[in-house]
Structure formats: C-alpha cells, structure tokens
Image: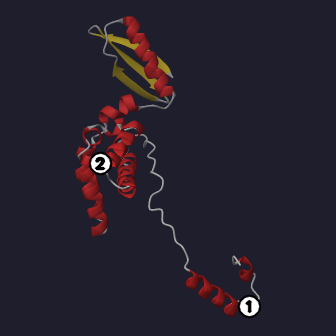
Amino acid sequence: SRRMLLKRRKIYSSRIMHEGKIYQQSLRTTNHTIAVRREAAVHAALLAGDFTSFDAKKSPSLMELAPRLHAYWARLKPSTLKFYKDTLKTISVHHDLWVGKLGRINEQMIETFTQRRLADGKAIATVNNELRVLRVVLRRAKKWKLIRAVPEIEILPNEGMRDYVISPQILADMVKLAHKNWPRSVFRFLLPF
C-alpha cells in the first residue's frame, strides 16, 4: 500500500492507497510528529483489516436504520415482526447501541448491554433473544454494505436448561414395549438393568 501525508491549511491529513482503494482522513493536528504517528497508526489498522475509522463515520445509527428494517421485516409473519419490533424497542433504551454508529458497535458495547440487562433482572433467555435480534440487525447491515464486519456476539450459556427424569412407571412401560416389539434387538442390552 502507498501512503501520503498531506498538509492543508496547517492541518495534516492522511491519504493511503490500500488494495486499490484510497482512504483519506484528517489527522486533526498541526504538529508534524503527531501527524506521522497518527498516520502510521491508521496505516497499521488498515493492514490489520480494521476499517472502522473510515466506515464508522459513514454508517447510520441503529435509530436511523430502524425504519428501513421495519420496511424489510414487513414481509415476515406478524408474530415474528412483533418480536423484532419489540426487541428493537428494548434495545433503543440503551443509548450507546441506539444512537451510536453501527460501524462503532463492538464486543465491549455488546457486553455492557448484556450485563445491564442481566443487572435489570432479565432472564438469560430474554437477554439471548435480544442478542440474537441485534446480531440479525448487524448482519443485515453488513449485507446492505453499511458496515464491513459484524462484531462477535456471544450467546449466554445455560439458557433454558431443563432436567427430565423418567418416572419408574414410564421406564417400566418402555422396557415392556422394547421386549414386546423387539425381542431379539440389541436395544434391550442398552437398558440400565
């Protein structure tokens, strides 16, 4: 990639050609030494595949994207549409996610959202559903080329863990049925007695 440090009206800016595309942004300084350091940091980020400093400014916020999402979701079943809209309304209470640019949403913001919801006393299943909707929204934004990458959204463990214990009567009925219907089957050897 090629780099160029420009100075316009005493303010330095960076112009970098990376993979055939030009990335330009103000470095917001009049000091040459600071400009060189900032330009090097921008270049290193581009080489690492981090385009957030360029994309985040152009990407809409979740609030700005909501009407487009509602129009897109209109084709869904009414119950699914209601679930998505209600969950988006819940997310809208969290200012960082709702008003911040989509390109700036990262794992730390999502973790903060998750911890706040759990602190509010919400069940793990509820928080996981909200995280799933957020993931759907961010993936849709990526598909619409509004952001380059979707941050990793980890679903909380132990959601809806249920233990099922077979009663002695049901077990006896199962054994009887196995012996009757499959007398020569290996199945009877798998039974716990």
Characterize the local packing of mark 2: few (<14), some (14-19) or many (20 or more) Cα atoms within 10 angstroms.
Answer: few
Q: Give the amino acid at mark 1.
A: Pro
Using the image, tell me which numbered label, if any, was put on residue 91: none
* Residue positioned 28% across, 40% down in the render: 60
User: Can you give x and y, in whole percent of width and height, for residue 8 in the image?
Assistant: 29, 11
Question: Mark 1: which secondary structure?
Answer: loop
Q: How many badges with numbers are in the image?
A: 2
- Say which quarter of the image contains residue 7: top left
Q: CA distance from mark 1 to mark 2?
A: 56 Å
Q: Which residue is mark 2?
A: 120
Question: Mark 2: which secondary structure?
Answer: loop
Q: In the displayed structure, would residue 63 be above or below residue 77?
A: above
**Camera-side residue: 177 or 18?**
177
* Residue positioned 36% across, 56% down in the render: 123
**Camera-side residue: 139 or 80?**
80
Q: Earlier in the sequence, mark 1 or mark 2?
A: 2
User: Can you give x and y, in whole percent of width and height, for residue 62 in the image?
Assistant: 28, 44
Q: Which residue is mark 1?
A: 183
* Residue positioned 24% across, 40% down in the render: 95
Quick check: marks 1 and 2 in contact, CB under 8 Å?
A: no
Q: Give the amino acid at mark 2.
A: Asp
